[in-house]
Image (cartoon, grey):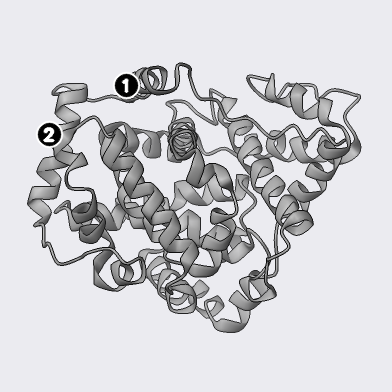
Amino acid sequence: MEKLKLYNQEELDQLRMRQDPLADLAVISLIENPELAQEINSWSQIPDQLPIHFPKVLQEYFSFFKEAAELADSELLKKGQDFFSQTGDIYLGLLGFYSLPYCYAFGDGAQVLVRSKRIVEEIGIRLAETGLFVMELFKPGGFYSDTSPYLTCAKVRLIHAFSRYFISTYSKDWEVKFGAPINQEDMLGTNLAFSMIVLRGLTKMGYSIDSQTFQLVLSYWKWVGALLGVDVKFWPETPKEAFELDRLIRKRHLKETEAGKRLIFALAEYYKQNIPDSIVRNQVDSLFGFFLGKEVAQVLKISHEINLPGSLVDLIFKFSGWKNYGPKKTYQKIRKMMESQQKEQFGKLVQLQIPVFNRP
């Protein structure tokens, strides 16, 4: 419980102004050398020997991941990946119906998201990229026998740094009160949304999440967070610490904003037009309201008056999963279904690519 003393207004105010220097310096180098961004996008994994023509800051950036690989805890990682194999379809569903909308309700962080036109204008691709990112994180053998997820984390971290650069350089309406773009507090909050909030969603649906499972998921996302540039000194080690950090961030930033309402409207409309399962498609607003609860739903102007029982929500998710994967779901089946849906919707497999910024 020793981290509870870190969760106060003063500490989080400081985190709100801190970003990720390692990735931010690497992005400046990539903007100066766009051909290197293209080269990185061609990789399937971080090479054993980094290219000698890479500038020092890029050498240092990718060396971080190679050094991290030596610390991989294969036992922890395998347990986390086994948990995802058992719950993966519901896990992804909760990201879409709970974690992402939850993030939209935190007004200052939503200011970054709404400034990315791709999130509201190419929402399908963005959601597919998020799904791919999570699938890569939980790939069986990932990080300890299959090193490709390190490149995934390196790319996502650079994408965040590119967003910071573009906002700082080109966004004329960014206000100091929002904090630094994609700062450490927001990164902690996002990591919580992809871990603790998913477990909270499972609990709302009637699942019993024991302390061991909760601890496992927190530990897995501590590992991922460190790779993504999160200062894990502040990452919760226990369920109580996780609840307290979420409570404080919620108290500080939960508020109604035009950014949040625009984001949730775009997400809802996309779901209503594109989710293949008609049962889920017809319950989009009700599912949002069920997971988010009254306070968050009010902030996002979502109706929360239709009270779905958790058992019914569980049945909706299970029925959808049964139709897609049959009686036994596996990581491979979930991945295959995701790729099939991408080909059908976009005519191609979605890939995570860092921007290639060709300056005039």
Disc 1 residue type (three-letter): Met
Q: Vertically, is 343 above or below 313? A: above
Q: Vertically, is 201 above or below 133? A: below
Q: In this view, does 231 lie to the left or right of 297?
A: right
Decide if residue 290 is in sight here.
yes
The quarter in which the C terminus is drawn is top right
Q: Is residue 47 left or right of residue 184?
A: right
Q: Is mark 2 on a helix, strand or loop?
A: helix
Q: Position of residue 76 (x, y in %)?
A: 44, 41
Q: Could you say which quadrant of the image residue 42 lies in?
A: top right
Q: Could you say which quadrant of the image residue 131 lies in?
A: top left
Q: Vertically, is 340 above or below 59? A: above
Circles 2 and 1: CB atoms closer than 8 Å? no
The quarter in which the N terminus is drawn is bottom left
Q: Which of 315 and 356 is in front in this view?
A: 356
Q: Residue at x 73, y 63 (%)?
A: 172
Q: Mark 2 points at which residue?
A: 319
Q: Which residue is drawn at 37% across and 54% down?
A: 265
Q: Nearer the viewer, residue 294 or 46?
A: 294
Q: Mark 1 points at which residue?
A: 337
Q: What element carries label 1?
A: helix
Q: Which residue is drawn at 37% across and 69% down?
A: 243
Disc 2 residue type (three-letter): Phe
CA gap between label 2 and label 1 equals: 15 Å
Query: Which of the two discs, 2 and 1, labels the residue nearer the N terminus?
Result: 2
Q: Indicate which disc residue 166 carries.
A: none
Task: Sort mark 1 into few (<14), some (14-19) or many (20+) by Cα contacts within 10 Å.
Answer: few
Q: Could you say which quadrant of the image residue 114 lies in?
A: bottom right
Q: Residue at x 37, y 37 (%)?
A: 79
Q: Position of residue 177 (x, y in %)?
A: 64, 76
Decide if residue 237 is in sight here.
no
